Amino acid sequence: MNLKLFISGKYTSVWWIILYLTGVYLTGRLTTLPAVEPHGGLLWPGAGQWLAPTLLNRVVNSLLVLLGGVLLLRINNRFSLIQKHTLLPFFFFLLLELASPALSLVGDGTVTTVVLLLLLTLFFHAYQSDRAQYAFLIFGALALGTLFCTRFAYFVPLFLIGFSQIRYLSVKSLAGALIGFITPFWFVVGTDLMPFSQLALLLPDFTPTLPANLPYDNPQFWIIVLTALLGLFSGTTILYTSFNEKRQIRAYNGFVNLLSVYTALLLILDYTHYSYYLPILNAAVSMQAAFFFTNNGNRKPGVILFYLILTLYIALFIWNLLPA
């Protein structure tokens, strides 16, 4: 038995879309989400305040999640991160998103994930490039994102580190990044849409605290733990199995690993707002897990592990549907 049906089944993606939408519907009917602390940007309210928590909200969020899954497939097909045709990035992303009820509504995390995946396309195009336009566009988009969610600024260090990883770090790229990041603020401050002092909101606004007791009785805690472990295991496997790949492919997968670890650290530091970081972590882990299981889908241990993970996420999803 192998995973061929999940990897390249003709109708697999259709069935998973149906199952995902069914799960979102059940989540809306059977769960009550806790009130979310509003967190806006420099100019506009956060995505969680754009729509009331109604059916329309869930429909819009579902479309954004599906778009994120398609972008993961597009990134793999365009840049050959896995170097095989596979539907697993799409499958894993829907599975991981479905497991957490808080991710069934439009929020900053879902919107940020879609934006970062779009920027990832630009970022990978910049490999060994001597053009500053890529850095300008990436950092300009991050700055624009802070207008509705200041946490976009948290990913500035990530892309700067990534520039070195893809051999794009130079005086020209750093200048392009600086100009790109400053330009939106120069415009909104210069036109009096926002006072200069408002930029202080870009500084981290969380205080790392460890809870006195870990929430062992909360399925969401175990979903986050399982996702982090899946990313750690898959990412470590990628480091070994991609060693003989081209330097460019290793750089791409290395950045996906970096995105996974970086986001996981942010989630730990700011666990109270896990719903912002978790969709981004889900996207990175989906690509990592897809790499592992696509390349190990014919081996019995890999198949057993795949179905074990699938069972665990479905069980946690059902646990979330049960009354507290």
Image: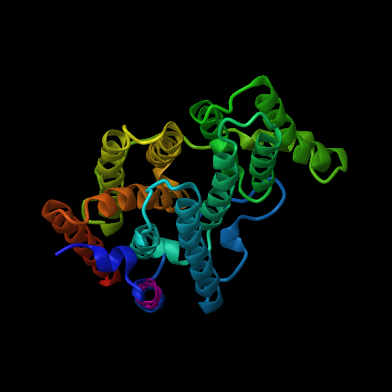
Picture quarter with the C terminus? bottom left
Q: Which picture quadrant has residue 202?
A: top right
Question: Residue 247 occupies which quadrant of the picture?
Answer: top left
Q: Who's the residue at 37% across and 78% down the image?
A: 22
Give the vertical position of 188 relative to 46 (above or below): above
Query: Magenta stretch?
Result: 13-20
Instruction: Looking at the picture, tell me which residue is in the foreground, 162 or 153.
Output: 162
Asked if residue 324 can be seen in this view, the reply is no
Residue at screen point 38% across, 38% down: 257
Verify whether residue 241 appears in magenta. Answer: no
Give above or below for 188 relative to 200.
below
By what rule are the colours in the image chosen? rainbow
Residue visible at 81% across and 36% down? 186
| Residue found at the very far right of the displayed protein | 191
In this rendering, would 188 be left or right of 93? right
173 lies left or right of 128: right
Question: Would residue 243 be found to the left or right of residue 165 on screen?
Answer: left
Q: 9 left or right of 276?
A: left
Q: For this rendering, which residue is in front, 220 or 121?
A: 121
Answer whether residue 267 is visible to the viewer in this image.
Answer: yes
- Look at the image and say whether residue 16 sits in the magenta stretch: yes
Q: Position of residue 5 (x, y in %)?
A: 27, 69
Against 73, residue 201 (above or below) is above
202 w.r.t. 19: above or below? above
Q: Main secondary structure of the magenta part?
A: helix
Q: x, y percentage for residue 1?
A: 14, 65
* Position of residue 7 measured from the top left corner of the image (x, y, whole percent): 31, 63
Find residue 108 and report its image quarter: bottom right
**Residue 222's x, y, as percent?**
25, 52
Residue depicted at 33% across the width and 53% down the height: 290
